[in-house]
Image (cartoon, rainbow, N blue to C red):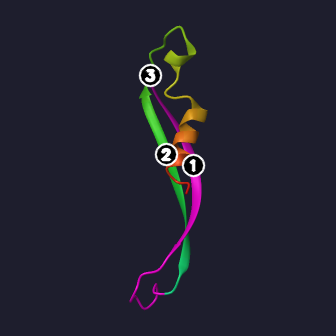
């Protein structure tokens, strides 16, 4: 059986585009990032066989990519 798990992050960031008439001044944006993992479950006898990934592990590893 195909199963999918996901986490969602919202980040704020700022930048400038030198020389651009509208974006040449510092300004910010907000972005929503969705990270998903999908796999076939093995229907085994342990909980590890019946998970795509441990949710806390996925959230921690995905969050590292978006934190400074």
Near-viewer residue (56 or 6): 56
Q: Quadrant of the N terminus?
A: top left
Q: Which residue is mark 1?
A: 8
Magenta segment boundaries in residue numbering: 1-24
Residue shown at the point (57%, 49%) measured from the top left: 8
Q: Which mark is residue 1?
A: 3
Residue shown at the point (42%, 81%) measured from the top left: 17
Residue 13 position within the rendered picture, expressed as x and y whole percent measured from the top left: 55, 68
Q: Residues within 10 Å of mark 1 (few under 14, many from 20)?
A: few
Tell me if label 3 and label 1 are in contact, CB under 8 Å: no
Name the N-terminal-most of marks 3 and 1.
3
> What is the secondary structure assignment of the residue under circle 1?
strand
**Can you say whether 39 is above or below 59 in the image?**
above
Q: Identify the residue at the far left of this view.
A: 19
Tell me if label 1 and label 2 are in contact, CB under 8 Å: yes
Question: Disc 2 and disc 3: Cα gap in Å?
Answer: 20 Å
Q: Residues within 10 Å of mark 2 (few under 14, many from 20)?
A: few
> What is the secondary structure assignment of the residue under circle 3?
loop
Tell me if label 2 and label 3 are in contact, CB under 8 Å: no
Q: Quadrant of the C terminus?
A: bottom right
Near-viewer residue (13 or 43): 13
């Amino acid at each position: 059986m195909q199963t999918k798990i996901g986490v969602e992050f919202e980040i704020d960031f700022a930048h400038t585009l030198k020389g651009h008439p509208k974006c040449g001044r510092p300004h910010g944006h907000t972005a929503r990032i969705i990270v998903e993992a999908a796999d076939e479950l093995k229907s085994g006898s342990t909980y590890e066989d019946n998970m795509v990934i441990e949710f806390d592990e996925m959230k921690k590893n995905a969050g590292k990519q978006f934190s400074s």
